[in-house]
Image (cartoon, helix red, strand yellow):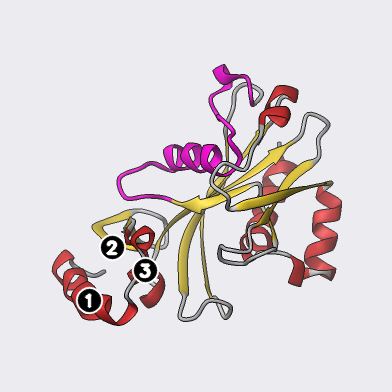
């Protein structure tokens, strides 16, 4: 539970050492393990340098035929070339889970999650369970110490939504369509092909799907 003054001191101390890129200055609300804001924000690079807990969102999209639509991550982002959930991203300071999910879906896949846009079936976005806490170190991009509280969502694409998808911001380079059973098999037998977000969030999605 760091204060704003402590964050400012840490930022001033470490910015000359890290020399973060401009896009990594994006502010995130610091949260407790339940995802509730502490009232203090910190830049992305500092959160990942020191393992400060912040929010992320994950989305599982279905095709009209019931396939899971998974993404292949770009070589220029974290976990390059790995298979991940349909959309993943951070929650910028001041945004709700749902607002952040809408922004990320539009940026990564060009998908408008408002059912009125005709790209997803009504009622649109489903909330999958409660936010959950996850932490890991990214050995491919050190030093990155991740402390995320993640909310998972689900939605079903329309045929028009499938046809209109595009890799808007270049963070996604391809799609993989597979069944939940095949995703479970990959997690068990080929985890090196998968991003940690998929491995950790998919069981939450699967449990929610089984309860519906």
Q: How many marks?
A: 3
Residue at the extreme top? 116
Sequence-first disc among 2 and 1: 1
Neighbour tally class for label 1: few under 14, some 14-19, many 20 plus, Cα within 10 Å = some
Residue at the image point whose x is 42% and y is 57% from the top:
34
**Circle 3 is placed at which residue position?**
45
Residue at the image point whose x is 69% and y is 31% from the top:
156
- Give me the disc on residue 10: 1
**Circle 2 is placed at which residue position?**
42
User: How far apart are the two marked residues, 2 and 3, measured between alpha carbons?
Assistant: 8 Å
- Percent across and percent down for residue 64 are 78, 29
> In the rendered structure, are the residues bearing label 2 and label 3 in contact, judged by CB atoms less than 8 Å apart?
no
**Start and end of the magenta stretch?**
91-119
- Give me the disc on residue 155: none
**Quadrant of the frame with the C terminus:** top right
Reply yes or no: does residue 166 show up in magenta: no
Reply yes or no: does residue 95 show up in magenta: yes
> Vertically, is 72 above or below 211?
below
Q: Nearer the viewer, residue 153 or 210?
A: 153
Neighbour tally class for label 2: few under 14, some 14-19, many 20 plus, Cα within 10 Å = many
Sequence-first disc among 1 and 3: 1
**Res. 7 image quadrant:** bottom left
- Percent across and percent down for residue 98 are 46, 38
Residue at the image point whose x is 30% and y is 82% from the top:
17
> Vertically, is 54 above or below 95?
below
> Is 137 on the left or on the right of 120, as rendered?
left
Question: Please, what secondary structure does the residue beneath circle 3 have?
Answer: helix
Neighbour tally class for label 3: few under 14, some 14-19, many 20 plus, Cα within 10 Å = many
**Quadrant of the frame with the N terminus:** bottom left
Q: Nearer the viewer, residue 30 or 164?
A: 164
Q: Nearer the viewer, residue 73 or 135?
A: 73
Question: Please, what secondary structure does the residue beneath circle 1 have?
Answer: helix
């Amino acid at each position: 539970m760091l204060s704003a003054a402590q964050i400012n001191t840490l930022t001033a101390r470490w910015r000359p050492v890290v020399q973060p890129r401009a896009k990594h200055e994006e502010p995130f609300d610091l949260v407790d393990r339940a995802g509730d804001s502490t009232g203090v924000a910190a830049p992305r690079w500092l959160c990942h340098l020191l393992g400060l807990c912040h929010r992320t969102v994950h989305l599982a999209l279905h095709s009209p035929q019931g396939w899971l639509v998974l993404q292949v991550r770009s070589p220029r982002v974290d976990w390059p070339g790995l298979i991940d959930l349909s959309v993943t991203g951070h929650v910028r300071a001041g945004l709700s889970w749902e607002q952040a999910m809408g922004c990320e879906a539009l940026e990564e896949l060009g998908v408008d999650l408002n059912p009125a846009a005709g790209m997803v079936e009504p009622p649109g976005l489903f909330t999958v369970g409660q936010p959950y806490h996850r932490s890991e170190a990214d050995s491919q991009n050190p030093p990155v110490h991740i402390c995320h509280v993640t909310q998972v969502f689900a939605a079903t694409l329309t045929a028009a939504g499938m046809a209109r998808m595009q890799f808007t911001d270049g963070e996604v380079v391809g799609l993989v369509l597979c069944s939940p059973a095949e995703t479970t098999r990959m997690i068990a037998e080929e985890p090196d092909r998968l991003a940690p977000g998929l491995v950790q969030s998919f069981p939450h999605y699967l449990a929610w799907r089984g309860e519906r």
